Image (tube, grey):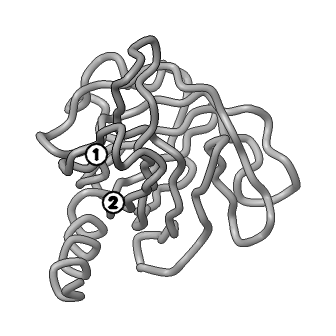
């Protein structure tokens, strides 16, 4: 992997994407945070998503790439690591040990080849710390992360592929 493009993607996201990440007017309605909430933390997630070639549901003899789980580092605007994102279930954990999971409320199409935007309703945080009081989490400014383009057939069932991705995660709290 060439480090320069990855660093540029991260730096560009931090410099440009995070500054406007919570600009609700530019997002599809489905993933906008309801009124009465304010941004409490903005992060850039850089990591990977694992997919596995598995039997297609309700289609015997067919296979498809199936989401297994994410693994990413969460950085603040200055590029300092402030936490991790992993799953399942989708879990955001701050360096202070506080963590939050949630339930997906909506997704909306992003750029071609990019994970969709996402709105998650947070469950109450575990542990006291940076993530206490989170009400919603948005995934925006996505880059990459979609299922592999390579063939998934009955012959290669059980194989896994890791796909690199990047996304801004914006954490909201009730006002």
Q: Which residue lies furthest to the bottom in this view?
A: 3
Q: With respect to residue 169, does 175 lie above or below?
A: above
Name the spot of residue 76 as percent of width and height, x first.
Answer: 47, 70
| Pointer 1 local density, CA inside 10 Å: few below 14, some 14–19, many at least 20 | some
- Which badge, 2 or 1, is on the more N-terminal residue? 1
Q: Quadrant of the C terminus?
A: top right
Residue in view at x 69 percent, y 64 percent? 94
Quadrant position of residue 134:
top right
In depth, the one of 164 and 68 nearer the eye is: 68
Residue 163, numbered label: 2
Nearest the viewer among 46 and 17 is 46
Pointer 2 with pointer 1, Cβ within 8 A: yes
SS class, disc 2: strand
Q: Residue at x 22, y 28 (%)?
A: 109
Q: Quadrant of residue 173?
A: top right
Name the residue rendered at 14%, 40% in the picture: 111
Q: Which residue is drawn at 25% across and 30% down?
A: 27
Q: Nearer the viewer, residue 31 or 116?
A: 116
Q: Position of residue 114 (x, y in %)?
A: 22, 45
Residue 174 in sight in this render = no
Residue 146 is marked as: 1
Q: In this view, does 122 lie above or below 15?
A: above
Between the C-alphas of marks 2 and 1, the distance is: 7 Å
What is the crowding at mark 2: few (fewer than 14 residues within 10 Å), some, or many (at least 20)?
some
Residue 23: give x, y in percent of width and height: 29, 39
Mark 1 falls on what kind of element? loop
């Amino acid at each position: 992997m060439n480090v320069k493009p990855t660093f540029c993607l991260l730096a560009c996201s931090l410099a440009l994407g995070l500054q406007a990440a919570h600009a609700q007017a530019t997002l599809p309605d489905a993933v906008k945070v309801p009124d009465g909430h304010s941004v409490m933390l903005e992060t850039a997630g850089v990591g990977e998503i694992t997919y596995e070639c598995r039997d297609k549901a309700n289609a015997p003899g067919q296979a498809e790439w199936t989401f297994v789980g994410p693994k990413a580092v969460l950085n603040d605007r200055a590029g300092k690591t402030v936490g991790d994102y992993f799953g399942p279930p989708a879990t955001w954990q701050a360096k202070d040990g506080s963590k939050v999971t949630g339930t997906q409320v909506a997704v909306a199409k992003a750029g071609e080849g990019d994970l969709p935007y996402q709105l998650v309703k947070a469950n109450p945080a575990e542990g006291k710390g940076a993530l206490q009081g989170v009400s919603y989490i948005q995934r925006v400014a996505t880059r990459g992360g979609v299922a592999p383009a390579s063939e998934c057939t009955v012959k290669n069932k059980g194989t896994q592929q890791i796909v690199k991705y990047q996304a801004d995660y914006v954490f909201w709290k009730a006002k």
